[in-house]
Image (spheres, rainbow, N blue to C red):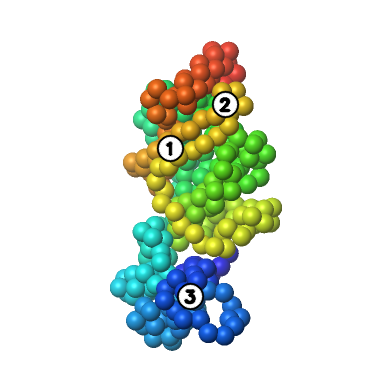
Amino acid sequence: MPQNPLGEFLRARRELLDPTDVGVRVTGVRRTPGLRREEVATLAGISADYYLRLEQGRDRNPSRQVLQAVARVLQLDAAGTDHLLSLATPGGPGPRRRPRDVVPVGTRQLLDALDLPAFVEDRTFEVLAANPLASALWPSLRVGQNRLRAVFLDEAERAVVLDPEQARAGMVAAFRASVGAGTDDPRVARLVGELSLASPEFARLWARHDVRDLAGGTARLQHPEVGLLELRREKLAVGGTDGQLLVVYHAERGSTSAQALALLGSLALSRTSDGTAPRT
């Protein structure tokens, strides 16, 4: 894993920018893609030498104003800017050594009470708890599964997801936001190393350093039992934990997806009665 996450992020985002997008006039042939370091520095109002020190990791405590200026030049959105600021903050957010797999009792009880697919994940997208309807909805929503690994390596997962390329790119960007500056955490390093070797697509997406908010969104999947589902995904922080999220899927009231989800719930309930439902 890189020892200079701030520099890696700045370089990756700089190389993705088309100079014309920021008003830089291009003359001649460029040997490398994106903006040059001195161009970023000029547009951000800082010296080229200072920006070079940022990319090389020689200035480990830059001011917030400088970083925000660089973020504007690199056209980072709110999530990307927050990520940039976190990388420059010593001891910034990221996985920490803790009893990370302990889901609060109240949250587990809530999972059982919900008539919607719901699960709890940690910062590395490992599923810590899931209700039967969640496990019936999605192959990877089972305790001990890692959703990032599944979306790239699990054939059953790939068969269910519609818009798979968009889904995988979004998940990598959300994963980077989730782990923040904690890319040197052993679990993160192992997972990124495994996926980089097994999936060229993951390696390419990871190298982009895209960042996306850990917020709700939409999910489209072709379920083998109930057909097309278009769902909304909500993510709620679990209080008293280090980054656990409660994730709930729901459909628009009265829609065909809501009807299909209700049917799936009936199927999951019948399996629970038979004792064949996955344990949470």
Q: Is residue 182 visible?
A: no
Q: Amino acid at mark 2?
A: Gly
The answer to which of 229 and 145 lies nearer the viewer is 229
- Where residue 154 sits in the image (x, y, percent)? 65, 40
Name which of mark 3 and mark 2 comes first in the sequence: 3
Front disc: 1 or 2: 2
The percent position of residue 123, horizontal first and vertical second, equals 47, 48
Residue type of the residue flagged with mark 3: Pro
User: Helix, strand or loop at disc 1?
Assistant: strand
Label number found at residue 227: 2
Q: Which residue is mark 1?
A: 233
Could you say which is closer to the camera, residue 188 or residue 43? Answer: 43
- What residue is shown with label 3? 19
Left/right placement of residue 102 relative to residue 65 reads right
Residue 155 marker: none
Residue at point 39% right, 57% down? Answer: 79
Q: Is residue 158 visible?
A: yes
Residue located 56% across and 68% down the image: 2
- Helix, strand or loop at disc 3? helix
Q: Residues within 10 Å of mark 2 (few under 14, many from 20)?
A: some
Please name the amino acid that badge 1 sits on: Arg
